[in-house]
Amino acid sequence: MNHWIMFPLLIPAVVAPLLILTGRYDEVLSRVFSVGGMVLQLLVAIVLAVQAFGGEIVRYELGNWPEPYGIVLVLDRLAATMLLMAAVIGLLVALVSIDNQDEQGRHFHPLLLLQMLGLNGAFIAGDLFNLFVFFEVMLIAAYGLASHGGGRGRLAASFQFVAINLLGSTLFLIGIGLLYAVTGELNLRELGQRLPAVSEAQRGLLSCGIAVVVTVFALKSAVFPFHFWLPATYSRSAPVIVALFGVTTKVGIYSLLRFYASVLAGNEACFSPWALSWVFPAGIVTVVLGALGVVAARGLGAMASFAMLSSGGVLAMCVAGFEPERIGAGLFYLVHSTIAGACLFFVVEGVIRRRHDVGDALSSSRPFVRHGLLGAGFLVAAIAVVGMPPLSGFVGKLLVLDSFKDSPWHAASWSTILGTSLLGLVGFARAGSVLFWKTPLLDVDSGPPEGGRIHTVMTFIAIGILVAVLAMMAIFAGVITENLRITTEQLLSGRVLPHD
Amino acid sequence: MRLMLIIAIPFFGALLPMLLARAGRRACAIATGLSTLMALVLLLSHAPVISAGQAFAVSHQWVPQVGMDLALRLDGLGLLMAGLILGIGLLIVIYAYHYLGKDESLGAFFTYLLLFQGSMVGIALADNLLSLLVFWEGTSLASFLLIGFWRHLTEGRQGARMALIVTGGGGLALIAGMLLLGDIAGTMTISELTARREAIQQSSRYPLALLLIAVGCFTKSAQFPFHFWLPQAMAAPTPVSAYLHSATMVKAGVFLLARLWPVLSGTEWWFYTIASMGAVTFLLGSVVALFKDDLKALLAYSTISHLGLMTMLLGLGTEAGLIATLLHLLNHAAFKGALFLTVGIIDHETGSRDLRNLGGLWRILPITGAIALLGLAANAGLPPLGGFLSKEMMLEAVSQVSWWGQPHLLTAIAAIAGTFAVAYSARFFAGAFLGEPGADLETAHGPSWGLVGPAALLVVSALAFGVFAQPLAEPILQTAVRGAMGNGDAPTIHLKLWHGVNLPLILSGVAILGGGILAGTFDGWRSLLKRRLAIEGQRVFRACEWQLVSVSRHVTERFHGGSLANYLTWFLVGVLALGGLSVWPSGLRSGDRQLLPINVLALLLITCLAAACLMTILLHRRRLLSVLMANVVGLITSIGFIYFSAPDLALTQISVEVVTLILILLALYFLPKETVAEASPIQRWRDAALAGLCGAAMFALTWVVLSSDGPTDLANYLIEQSKPAGGGSNVVNVILVDFRGFDTFNEIMVLAISALIIYALLDGAMHGAAADKLDHWEHDIPRSPEKHPAMFISFTRALLPLALLVGVYMFLRGHNQPGGGFVAGLVVTIALIVQYMVSGYQWAAERISIDYHSWIGWGILLAAGTGVASMILGYPFLTNAHEHFDLPYLGSLDISSALVFDLGVLMTVVGAVMLALANLSRLGRRAERAAQKAAEAAKLLDRGE
């Protein structure tokens, strides 16, 4: 029996209670457990990636109940890719939090691990209701992390986050209910096979159920008009955590892809096209709103948040048509934008750490405590986020643009992506100029500012690792793209295979 | 492979100055210089073969999916360009070492410089449209860093941003253009494009691709209307201005146009786009240059003008135009580089570069003056310098072309621009070197050889290209032209200073004469035209940028203003619209199940339910009542469950209602008792309409679902297998702990997380502003005089063991009868909570010594452990094992591993709820103490008076 697929869930599910039991009293112990758990998770993710890239799809029947009656976990190339990405970011977030963010409130590390549980679960769930449960784990843990550290603005923003997303959970339940009512199934693959059998009279219900579920995925990935929770939550939460939220947002896009591939693909005649056709224009609006927000931002955190919003919109545009080539390009961009976003938020964390009283505000009024490396980090992260060479953002942009070449949305997508790139350039050039050129320097020798020594070692290490990953992604873009093409093929061919 | 090295050396070399920064300035400079020299030597080692008409090529696959290869190709054109970059680069390194102050971070400077150099050589050698783009954007970034090198200068920062945005923006257009071009041609390899010229030019997408590429080139080469960034970029240290913004980077646009010349040129689109804009820029630049007092600004506009000249020549589409361009490319790099370096020397030695302050420098800086004189002569196109040669060729080429039926228009423009070029050159020299020295110039001293040497070398080559045109410039040009033409049949070139008396010579004479007069009488009419002619592109740009920022802020605040009500409105409208549209094509049809007859009880329940719902909304400002009404809704729902024979659900619902009500009431104590009206009446009606629509939609969907028969095979399977395979006759519980035990496993995580969050949030409330509020707490609702009623106490204490027993009972029988870990947990919790409520937290806490955190932790571990146990036995996670026992006294008993799992659930539920309660009480006790203290103080005060 191959149990490897359980470990991404078991590790956080065991380490988190251990942290609750022991880590409450001992900061060092909780850090050791947390980082240790993350390292294990990364190792497991690597093992799973090796397995999945062998081409085999693992289906794990929980409780030994045969599919489609019980819950099933599924590992294919795409899921393995996402697990790996989440594990890398998770480990780095745990490391960076050691710089002191984890002392700002209680139970940081168990919440972090339980967030990983939700993420990992959502990536391998093969059952719609199980996916819902993991969404809940993710949501509630994210609420805890978003409010971590407290403060008026942060609590208000995290409340909005949880309020909007709870409405989303309700909708998800409604959607699942509708789909169950017409198909009698929750298993994703089985759902897809039953769709053609839905009677003419129930097509309306079916379409509505699909539309509602798609809406929920759009909410999770912050696509207009369901994105409103993102900017405030991301810009008010502790930046180190937002680095992980970047992965959480991708769950929406991922689930949409998964849902399409296992349920909708090949069954387009069974439901109304309206359930899906709005995603592309909504993606464009999201990209534009995000880019305008980048220009408008008054703080670095807000700027990074809107940049994330914008990149999410690009992803929505990419998956909207469910064309294999575009999905492949989108997946490259997905991995890139997650890593680049995390890198940028680590920089924001560093900036806040080194400018106590003004935080990340884009003003030059208060000096920095020596920041040469931070400036370099910002430059590189901004290059990645805006999509300039030599990092992977540029390749991602080329791949995305190229994939729209022969589509009817050619002009719209190209002008949106290139136009908003320019807006991003304007915004980030302004921010960098104000923060790292205009703001005077405080020499570290003149003594530490109030608040004692500043720890940013882990932050710099994390930024360094992420930059290296981005550079590697650029250098090996060809290989990665080829692999993502196969991944997409595997994802989309899942539905053609007969029931085995 | 050696080709790759030419590019790799500067990029890897860029690491050296950064690392050597601590080893001193000299080490940085030597490392930079050596890197450049190595690359140059390597480049020149290819020269003999290339001048024989060969080319070197190397290609590595990079992203084959989009046709991006790391392909390099060194031909004559690339050799010319790369030679200029590396050759001048070497001089600039020497110059910069002497130019920059001792306290400036030379390491960073040289690192940026080498990054630029690598990118620039990359542009020169790239043989793939997309990898060329990589290098192209690289130069924009390096230029940004170099212009902003003096970070304390406002102009430097603004200039850097403007340059990045304009050239970067152009780069984006170029991306689109390149992708289009590659798509039309079917290849991204530049050297393969020439063969497909016909197909490309006939494509309907050719004009668009051309325009996009032109925008990229125009922004980079500072062509009108994108020229304004270049004068702003002059805030950079002078070595940067000389290198990037005169000799090399700004030529990238011209170079790319030349590179694509064999592919794209020769059409009307090409001619009217490229030649027209070039001509406008040519004229505009030289006219504006005359009116600039700042020497660097003057040279910047002069550069713009010369770039316009080259662009115009390429736009002609004739071989003569191409040849003249390349010759001028070479000449201009030499003399304009020298002139910038001269201005740097003047600035460095006198502290000023304003023509109004300068004068008489000839006496102090004679060598610099001589260099400037020669450079300016070349700039003005005077014989025998190289500039004269290329200008003659330019006039010759232009005179053969007519623009929109006007045979002399371009010639006239060229002549006028040439006249102005003479004029501003003359003004430069006369203003700086002749006349009386300015007052504060007496302290000026002679420059070091490191500053003069590079300038002299450049200007000497500018002279040599004219005087020794045939042996020196001709082979270079011949090789370059052959490379640019892309095929072997390039024309043979003969360079001569004296062509006899012809039209170009006459025009040159006129220009020199006119220019002299212009410069001589300049003071008379400068004020007249100065304002009108100085087109302040940068002001327009800044206004645009500010406008963009304010529009963005407006939109962003309009959309993301922070109102939850607005966000939810968008959300709900979106869902309603999408759901509605999806339903639209097929519609909703009520099913054909037979409806049950309605009876009095059902009617009563539904009426109560509706009334309670309504009251919850109507009373929402009075929080306590509203919460109670919501609870009523829940209780009626649980009666509904009983009515429809779902006792498990009813049990769960009732216990959940009770527990949540208690927790909410505890929390409510700390909140305002009434909500203020926040929404305007219109908003309320809007919200009411939206809520009504949502309700109607839900009703319609529910109706259709309930009235139709859905597939039931899954449900049937679960019911059938519950007893035989699941070992329990209560199918609801078997679903919860077995069929879908994994969902439950994760749901207890949700519960645990919630408790942790409540703990963390309330712990946060014990510090800071919230704690302050607690410490000044005053009771705002009347309190009962009897805190712990005796009857209540004795009753509940007696009840405790019974209630716990009920909990155990519920737990044990769960697998077969209504009950289970979740319900049992809630029952136990309620039993405990009651003790806390009635006897006071203090009393209860002294007797119930449970660490609720541990309960949560152990609960999860127990549940996980059950699952892991089955894995150890070789079954999937959470596989249930059950066994039937006949035991004495207890009778027949089914023991199932799910029971252990369920115990984990129970522990987590108890731990989570009690943790929340304990922390709310903690808050309460703190407030209590504060209130008591306040009351005592008030009493003391009363007594005192």
Image (spheres, grey):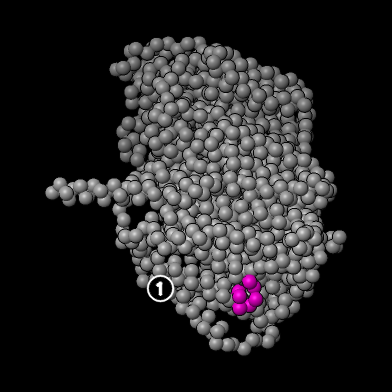
Which residue corresponds to the image point at 62% horizontal and 69% vertical from the top-left? B649
Give the structural element (helix, strand or loop) at label 1. Answer: helix
Q: Quadrant of the C terminus of chain A?
A: bottom right
Tell whether A330 sits left or right of B173.
right
Tell whether B527 sits left or right of A99.
left
| Residue B485 location, quadrant | top right
Which residue corresponds to the image point at 17% horizontal and 50% vertical from the top-left? B942
Q: Is any atom of residue A99 visible in this view? A: yes
Above or below residue B655? Residue B380 is above
| Residue A335 location, quadrant | top right
Q: Position of residue B305 (x, y in %)?
A: 50, 36
Viewer-nearest residue: B488 or A161: A161
Viewer-nearest residue: A464 or B362: A464
Q: Position of residue A56 (x, y in %)?
A: 83, 49
The type of residue carrying mark 1 is Leu
**Disc 1: which chain?**
B
Q: Is any atom of residue B499 visible in this view? A: no
Viewer-nearest residue: B580 or B220: B580
Q: Position of residue A313 (x, y in %)?
A: 59, 54
The residue carrying mark 1 is B618
Which residue corresponds to the image point at 42% horizontal and 18% vertical from the top-left? B348
The boundaries of the magenta stretch are: B641-647
Other residues around mark 1 within 10 Å, as few (<14) / some (14–19) / many (≥20): few
Q: Is residue B645 magenta?
A: yes
Above or below residue A8? Residue B230 is above
Tell whether B192 sits left or right of B784.
right
Q: Residue most toward the front?
A: B889
Q: Position of residue A54 (x, y in %)?
A: 83, 45
Which residue corresponds to the image point at 73% horizontal and 56% vertical from the top-left? B898
